[in-house]
């Protein structure tokens, strides 16, 4: 098997101001997580798709599967306390030579961006999508701060893709609060991280405003 995609869906939606985790909220008549799974299946229907989800929400998810008649094949893995734990659980089942890790609440990722990331990972061993900053940047506090060169900084997206052995070796390291994504762990074992252009549409749904933006982006895609 060439590719495994690990889709992490462990958020509980505190900033979404909802009792339902954001990955289950309905976007354009389909739960967010189903949009995300569908994109990767349509990109390569031979890829192994693994979804990590807290066990407390498995029953609810199965009800959504039935309600929306969702038939795309995937493997469901119990999510852990941290994103790190969820991915480490998923790696046990990962069979692909290249493993991509993606946020379940980034449903607007497109096939072209996925392909750019994967192709660079096949050449270099690791690849992550990034976006250049548009705004000016300052560092410090409200009372003491200084300007920074925005051209030296990027915002980081997913999917992040790595050769299987690289990601497995990276996850032999213990969890620390600094582990916010996979590239951090990979970097700690001495593997350089290679950057590829991301997509402005590939937003991470975190707040109610993000849902509105995602709805707008979807309507724009349909009109093209």
Image (cartoon, rainbow, N blue to C red):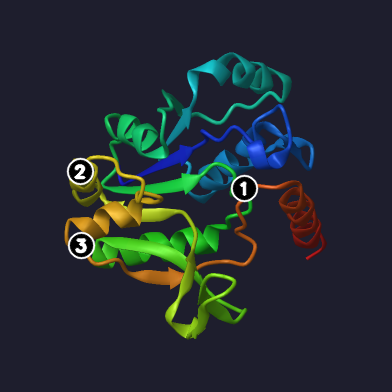
How far, Cα to Cα, is label 3 from label 2?
14 Å
Mark nearer the N terminus (1 vs 2): 1
Mark nearer the N terminus (3 vs 1): 1
The reply to whether discs 3 and 2 touch (Cβ–Cβ < 8 Å) is: no
Q: Quadrant of the C terminus?
A: bottom right
How far, Cα to Cα, is label 1 from label 2?
29 Å
At horizontal 20% and vertical 62% (from top left) the residue drawn is: 191
The reply to whether discs 3 and 1 touch (Cβ–Cβ < 8 Å) is: no
How far, Cα to Cα, is label 3 from label 1?
28 Å
Q: Is residue 213 left or right of residue 79?
A: right
Asked if residue 157 is positioned above or below residue 51 in the image, the reply reads: below
Q: Is residue 46 visible in this depiction of the protein?
A: no
Asked which secondary structure carries label 2, the reply is: loop
Q: Which residue is mark 1?
A: 107
| Label placed on residue 191 | 3
Q: Nearer the viewer, mark 3 or mark 1?
A: 3
Mark nearer the N terminus (3 vs 2): 2
């Amino acid at each position: 098997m060439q590719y495994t995609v690990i889709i992490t869906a462990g958020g509980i939606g505190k900033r979404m101001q909802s009792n339902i985790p954001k990955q289950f909220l309905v976007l354009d008549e389909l739960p967010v997580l189903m949009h995300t799974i569908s994109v990767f299946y349509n990109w390569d229907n031979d890829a192994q798709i693994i979804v990590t989800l807290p066990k407390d929400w498995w029953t609810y998810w199965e009800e959504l599967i039935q309600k929306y008649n969702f038939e795309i094949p995937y493997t469901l893995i119990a999510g852990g306390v941290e994103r790190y734990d969820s991915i480490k659980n998923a790696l046990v089942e990962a069979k692909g030579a290249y493993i991509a890790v993606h946020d379940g609440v980034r449903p607007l990722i497109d096939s072209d961006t996925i392909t750019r990331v994967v192709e660079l990972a096949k050449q270099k061993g690791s690849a992550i999508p990034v976006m250049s900053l548009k705004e000016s940047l300052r560092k410090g506090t409200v009372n003491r701060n200084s300007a920074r060169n925005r051209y030296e900084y990027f915002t980081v997206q997913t999917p992040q893709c790595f050769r299987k052995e690289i990601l497995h070796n990276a996850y032999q390291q213990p969890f620390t609060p600094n582990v916010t994504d996979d590239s951090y762990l990979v970097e700690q074992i001495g593997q350089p991280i290679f950057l590829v252009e991301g997509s402005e549409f590939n937003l991470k749904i975190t707040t109610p405003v993000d849902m509105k933006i995602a709805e707008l982006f979807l309507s724009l895609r349909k009109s093209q």
